[in-house]
Image (cartoon, grey):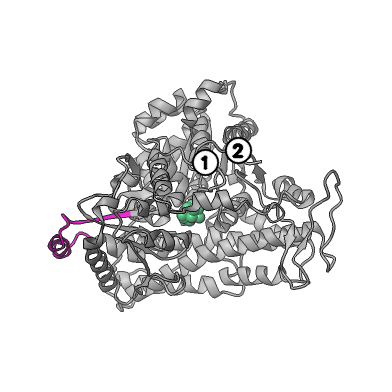
Amino acid sequence: MPEEKKVKSIDQASEEMIAKATEEKISTVFDRADKMKPCPIGAEGSCCKNCAMGPCRVPAARGSEVQPTGVCGATAETISARNFCRMIAAGSASHSDHGRRVVEAFKLMAEGKTRDFQIKDEQKLLKLALDMGVAIGNRSNNEIALDIAKICENEFGKQEGELLFIKNAPKKRQEIWRNLGVVPRGIDREVVELMHRTHMGVDQDYKNLMLQGTRAALADGWGGSMIATEIQDCMFGTPTPTLSEINLGVLKEDMVNIIIHGHEPALAEMLAVEGQDPELTKYAQSKGAKGINLAGMCCTANEVMMRHGVPIAGNYLQQELAIVTGAVDAMVVDVQCIMQGLAEVARCFHTKLITTDNRAKITGTTYMAFDEYNPKASARAIIKAAIDNFPNRAPSKVRIPQVKTSLIAGFSHETISYLLGGLFRASYRPLNDNIINGRIRGLAGVVGCNNVRTTHDSAHIVMIKELLKNDVLVLSTGCAAMAAAKQGLMVPEAAKKFCGPGLAEVCETVGIPPVLHLGACIDNSRILVAATAVVKDGGLGDDISDLPAAGAAPEWMSEKAIAIGQYFVASGVYTVFGTTFPTIGNKTFTNHLFKDMEEMYGGMWDFQPDPARAAKLMIEHIDKKRKALGIDKARERVLYDMEMRRELEG
Ligand code: BF8
């Protein structure tokens, strides 16, 4: 069962705005969750609604192991697998469609059809060209980019062969995938085939279904997501450590506040650039504001923070709360993780909710299309609309929580290797050495969402602090990263305060925070690349599954998280989810994910809603891997008493 809820959020700014919403009788996700409890049958994956003879509910009767079948005879494990696979398909499609849009923008840039974007990271462009067999010679960057764009486009529609980035994985991993027949051929093909195989009356063998589920998940992690990250880096710049601030306190009472919310960074990039324009600042001043204040929300926030230092207003469960401050003149959204509830909350204030993508409109809000041929003009029109709305703000309704924290983000895989090895001999050697000598016990990826069914941010923080205490270096993305940043875990000084002695020493020597912010959810591909680099550096086995490493999404909620989890598992990573798990209604299929997968991939799923216990499971897995590598040595695990737990959760 999910942990007992005490407060809605451990974040003070969020609690303040939840209270303001209650005072002003504004309904938010927190109220709606209290009113609407999850359907227990659907939550455990025991409901099939894939045809009109149902929906069929197949939970086992209390005290019984026997589960009924659907009216077509589909077994509970088939139903469970189908539901899980459809989550993977949706998650993989979301990341990949994001990747496709980035490639389209890249191609327009390369063809000279828009001059608003240029190549920002030439080195990365050339590396990609080498990886993809694109001629460099004395060709222009745009000529090279056009070839790369065409190759990437083809990755989506390819019908046979293997996705190109598969060959970047450790050799042993590639062989595992080939032997199991799960190497993706083309991104779209794997998603379409998975949707077909989960249709009524098609694939009715849960193991066989999951092979295609895995193929579609790998098409995300080593395909769509990786393409998105690589091309974004070429076009917008590879992130480097950048200092900024996070939480609702970054909003400013005397400025035009524009929140950029969603996932795809092209428009957000332009807004970040144009938001600096003195002419627009003057226009804002003409309307009575001191200037323009941009702030990010959700994964877009991570993108523009890492590349431009734009402050972050908050993570997923803070989107409505940002509007509740009364100080947001425009919230600009594109795709993914945007709650429809925003429209209703915005109606209680002057806030203009602007959708920008024709794939994602919200009834009753303003639509201002992002024109990819004219990104700059689109961005300027949106900023102007926000400025025009500033005079409509009701000062009596404004209350901005005075809560914000410093963070350093932008630890791309390339940056980590420069920081560790120096600019001229960038390498992971110092990291591997410190893992081998035990100063760093292992690596953990703590990623994923917020989920209103558990206290906002709490599970992330309890888990991360427990890992740090036990000398586990944490890599983070998405809303998990923002949770960590808000609690002050993303500054170098955090090392001394929160880490075991070994990890603290390494972080202090290198000058890095103990929780490294690698970017948005799409950038989980950076974790795969970094893990592969660690393997290739040597001394820690010859595959990702040999590494003393684990992954977690303690507050997950989205289908993308399931796709990510599956590509981590299939890449050899022990991956534990919190809050709830969508297959627990069926033991056979859950065992397949939790046990059989270890045999197949060396990585497997797990579920543990108590974040401290989940951290313990991750540490046990890390220790198991250390032992297998012969680098284990007696070390004491830090056990928390109640007082320490309270302090952590407070
Ligand atoms: O892609 S972590 S709530 S914002 S799904 Fe969404 Fe989850 Fe946040 Fe970004 Ni990722």
Span colored in magenta: 275-295
Would you place residue 460 above or below residue 80 in this image?
Answer: above
Tell me which corner region of the image, top left, top right, bottom left or bottom right, holds residue 277.
Answer: bottom left
Q: Is residue 282 magenta?
A: yes
What residue is shown at x 38% (from left), y 38% (from top)? 490
Tell me which corner region of the image, top left, top right, bottom left or bottom right, holds residue 275.
Answer: bottom left
- Coordinates of residue 513 in the picture (x, y in percent): 38, 36
- Coordinates of residue 152 in the picture (x, y in percent): 47, 70
User: Quadrant location of the N terminus?
Assistant: top right
What residue is shown at x 57% (from left), y 71% (from top)? 188
Would you place residue 604 above or below residue 292 in this image?
Answer: above
Task: Indicate left or right for 360 with 172 as reference.
Answer: left
Task: Indicate left or right for 453 with 511 as reference.
Answer: right
**SS class of the residue under badge 2?**
loop
Residue density around tag 1, few if under 14, some if 14–19, many if 20 or more, within 10 Å = many
Would you place residue 208 above or below residue 611 in this image?
Answer: below
| Residue hosting label 2 | 3
- Coordinates of residue 429 in the picture (x, y in percent): 44, 38
| Residue hosting label 1 | 455
- Asked if the residues shown at circle 2 and circle 1 are in contact, with their CB atoms under 8 angstroms apart, the answer is yes
Question: Looking at mark 1, is its residue's CB closer than 8 Å to ligand 1?
Answer: no
- Coordinates of residue 505 in the picture (x, y in percent): 40, 26
Residue density around tag 2, few if under 14, some if 14–19, many if 20 or more, within 10 Å = some
